[in-house]
Structure formats: structure tokens, C-alpha cells
Image (tube, rainbow, N blue to C red):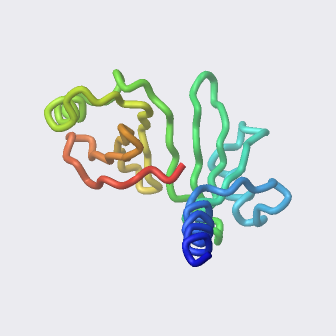
Amino acid sequence: MKKFVLMATLLAGAASANAQKVNEANVPAGVLGAFKTECPKITSAKWEKEDGNYEAHYKSGNAEMTCVIDPSGKYLQSETAINASSLPDAVTSYLNKNLPGKKITEAAKITGADGKVTYEAEADNVDYTFDSDGKLLKKEADND
């Protein structure tokens, strides 16, 4: 019985670490306002809450986009899904050297509120974040 309780507790904790879908009616007005300011042409988005922040997922043209806003309504960053082949050469070189044979399953260009651009590549459920020069900034398990 102790093993069952421990396993149930661990599974519940893991589930809460993942992004949680949020109905737009439950998104704070300040967050919605910031989204309308940052993305005035977008009329429909799917919302999630991850790591305490709100994420609006939407399409802009053919691009899959995400806008991340904190609970107070402060815009944090936007993410644009890209093909792995669109990653900068320095990032691709790092990945080929350090992850030989690993397939990049997702890639994104991230633009922070300050305009700073970083890139993210996912392989084997691990996210690798790089600066625009291809320097590895962080490596973390993907929670999605």
C-alpha cells in the first residue's frame, strides 16, 4: 500500500509540472490585454498555464506561435516553431558534435521582451537553449 501511495503522489506531482490548459474565460484580464497589445491581429488562441505564466498558442500565417505573459500582464517572450534545418549553423554544429545520431523533434526561435533572440532544440525529451551565436545556455527536461 505504501508503494501505491508513493507512486500516486509522484504521478500527481509530475502531472502538475506540465502545462495546464486554461479556458480563455479564466485568463486574467491583464494577461488578455497584454496579448491583445502584443498580437493585435490574432483573434483566437489556445491558452495554457506553465511555470506560473500564461501561454497563448496561435497561428500567424503558416507559423505556429506562442506568446508568454506573466500573471501580472507583463509580456515575457514569443516563440516561433521552426524546422530544425532553420537553426543557425553554430547550433547545428553543436548538436551534430554533442548529440550524434539524435533527432531534433522540435525547434523554435525565441524572442524575449528585450528583443534578444535565442534558439531551442528538443532531442530525446530534453530542451537545449542556445544564444544566437550557438553557445549552449541551458539544458533541461521538456515538461510538455
Residue 4: image location, x then y, percent:
60, 70
Q: Quadrant of residue 29?
A: bottom right
Asked whether 54 or 40 is in front, the reply is: 54
Instruction: Report the residue at 71% width, 50% height from top.
Output: 47
Residue furthest to the bottom: 2
Tag count: 0
Q: Nearer the viewer, residue 108 or 32?
A: 108
x and y, in percent, of residue 11 in the image:
58, 63
Going 81% across and 54% down the picture, which residue do you hit? 23
- The residue at the point 57 percent across, 54 percent down is 68
Q: Is residue 53 left or right of residue 82?
A: right
Residue located at (44% from left, 52% from top): 112
User: Would you say 9 lies left or right of 27 here?
Assistant: left
- 102 vs 56: above or below: above
**Given the current orientation, which residue lies at the most extreme left position?**
97
Residue farthest along the front direction in this orientation? 1
Asked whether 37 or 4 is in front, the reply is: 4
Image side of residue 20 versus residue 93, left or right: right
Quarter holding residue 51 = bottom right
Residue 46 x/y as whole percent: 73, 44
**Which part of the image, by quadrant, shows the N terminus?**
bottom right
* Residue 64: image location, x then y, percent: 58, 32
Q: Is residue 78 above or below residue 9?
A: above
Q: Is residue 104 above or below residue 8?
A: above
